Amino acid sequence: MFRSERRRGLLPALALFLLAPLVGEFLLGNQPITELPGLVMLAPLYGGGALLVRETARRTGRGWPTMVVLAVAYALIEEGPVDQMLWNPHYGGFDMGSAYASTHVPLLGTSVEMLEDVVSMHTIWSICVPIALVEAFARDPRRPWLGRAGPPATGLLFVAASLLLSVSQAQSEHFVAAPRQFAVAGVAIAGLIVLGFVLGRRPEARPRADADAPSSWTVGAAAFAVTSLYWLRDRLPEGLPVWWPVAAWFVVLGAAVALCARWSRSRGWSASHRLALAGGALLTYVWVGFTHAKEMGVPVATALTGNVVFGAGAVLLLLVAAARTGGARRPT
């Protein structure tokens, strides 16, 4: 019986392991469909990180507050010490220094706008959306999927992939950040991990709000609108003060967090609502992928094929998850 349960847990763990890089890189259009074999390298980093975030929270009896904060820590780990995009002015052959120069803060050693981009993309799409999608298929989303040896093995795999990518990036980019930049990132990452456990109280211990939860369609539409608004800021008219969009990001983030916190404490909040949040964000990446792939220097036919395949796959996965979750109507 015990072994049978563990074997059933391996399937969602493997699904999350593969889904995280598929959403984070391929659905976005960062990687063309011809680079699918690259999952061998991306899955230990993205999937390993998502599994560690999810299993750490669930094994300690914590929920989404912990997972969200740990996902922010993951974002800083990947784009900080691992590939150093936060600090490399010519990362990937792009003039990142000029693109983000207007919001660069010497004390941080990087740009505030870049930090917002890194935190937004990895927290929402690389970690939280894949976790929510896979948990929609679980009988009890609060239960761990891996046995005792699973998290340490996943951690070793994640560390090995991170070290390999870090060395590879340093050699190919000919760039290594200053010790002070590594130190600031390390303090921030450690602080976020501690914060995740401080905030991560058990969901059932939270007080319930008096209001009823909105419909799942309302929640999904709100998630789609807010996440799409984030990507549309690149299309703001020229001449706008550079710090206005940066400040607006914090305002929208605060409002979204407050609204989600209130909704999740409302009567009738269920797994369908949580899936709707993830689904709205997922659909944003579907349309963003069609525009983003053009900027990566990929042949149009290749980019379009990838957009159609991964976009259709994302929509199909969401529909199946919605059918399963809608039928169960599990409260969370």
Image (spheres, rainbow, N blue to C red):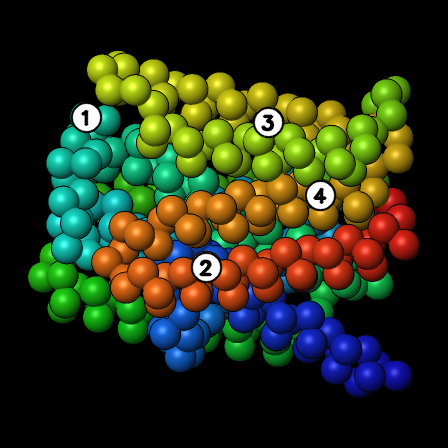
The residue that label 1 is drawn on is 102
The residue that label 3 is drawn on is 256
Kind of residue at badge 3? Ala
Task: Look at 16% across and 31% down and name the residue there.
Answer: 101
Kind of residue at badge 2? Asn
Kind of residue at badge 4? Ala
For marks 2 and 4, give the one nearer the viewer. Answer: 2
For marks 1 and 4, give the one nearer the viewer. Answer: 4
**Residue 143: quadrant of the picture:** bottom right
- Tell me the element at label 2: helix
The residue that label 2 is drawn on is 307
Is residue 252 visible in this depiction of the protein? yes
**Residue 4: quadrant of the picture:** bottom right
Indicate which disc, 2 or 4, sits on the residue closer to the N terminus: 4
**Residue 50: quadrant of the picture:** bottom right
Above/below status of 241 relative to 274: above
